Image: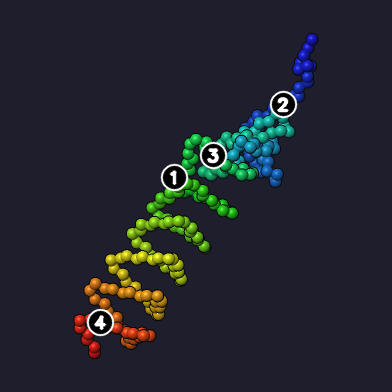
Amino acid sequence: MKSAAANRQYPVYDPVHLIGTVTRREEDGSFSVDCDGRAWRARQAASCLLAPQMGDQVLISGPDAARVYLIAVIEQADPGVARLETEGDMVLRSRAGSVALESTQAVRLAGRGAVNIDTASLKVQAEDAHCVAAKMKYLGAEMTATVGTTRLIGKVYEAVMDRLSFLSRVSFRTTEEVEHVRAGSLDYRAEKSARVHASYTMVTGENLVKVDAKQIHMG
């Protein structure tokens, strides 16, 4: 007695497995591939991440002529340019190792919406760095910077903090117009000499003005 599997009728396939040249890309995303004078219409396989370009030598395969897929790019017409493309989101993940992007020239990251970096530790090292932004915000618990020379050039500089400490060997400050200082108590002390000079100098006090020294010279 024959088994049911033996009596079952299986479909007859006429498989396609050819190498051809990409001639154009259709509006629906499929590709027209010329194989020895015959044009085949093939959809890009999900496993083929390298985007085919015009003139590339590609491998097409399928169970029949109605189901043909472009499964690999065999040889590029322009080996100097390669694109990895997917229709949806893409995740590059290493389960146990590291992921490295290396280039002998430049590496460019571009996101139309945003570029996010989320990591426990971030290290950036460069001989020359440039940062250009219309608006920039920094939020952190602590910042430490060691810089040989610092230059700030801008229109308005504002700093608001509970305590400001400034230590230097030499301090030089120039104000072209008016400088205002408002404080609850003001204390200036010099180890050697102190000098206040102007075309007109006024020292006023609401209740008391005191001048105390071993010698006082007026005039």
- Viewer-side label of 4, 1: 4
* Residue 128 versus residue 207 in the image, above or below: above
Mark 2 or mark 4: which comes first in sequence? 2
Q: CA distance from mark 1 to mark 2?
A: 46 Å
Which mark is first along the chain, 1 or 4? 1
Mark 2 closeness class: few <14, some 14–19, many ≥20 residues within 10 Å: few
In the image, 153: left or right of 65? left
Q: Residue at x 55, y 43 (%)?
A: 82
**Amino acid at circle 1:** Thr
Of circles 4 and 3, the one toward us is 4
Quick one: SS at disc 4? Answer: loop
The tag earlier along the polypeptide, 4 or 3, is 3
Count of numbered labels shown in the rendering = 4
Badge 3 amino acid = Arg
The amino acid pointed to by label 2 is: Asp
Dots 4 and 1: beta carbons under 8 Å? Answer: no
SS at badge 3: loop
Say which residue label 4 marks: 212
- The tag on residue 14 is 2
Residue 29 in the image: state x and y as whole percent: 68, 43
Closer to the observer: label 2 or label 3?
3
**What SS does tag 2 mark?**
loop
Residue visible at 40% across and 51% down in the picture: 126
Percent position of residue 7, x then y: 79, 16
Q: Nearer the viewer, mark 1 or mark 3?
A: 3
**Which one is in front in this view, the residue at disc 2 or the one at disc 4?**
4
- Residue tagged 3: 93
Q: Nearer the viewer, residue 128 or 159?
A: 159
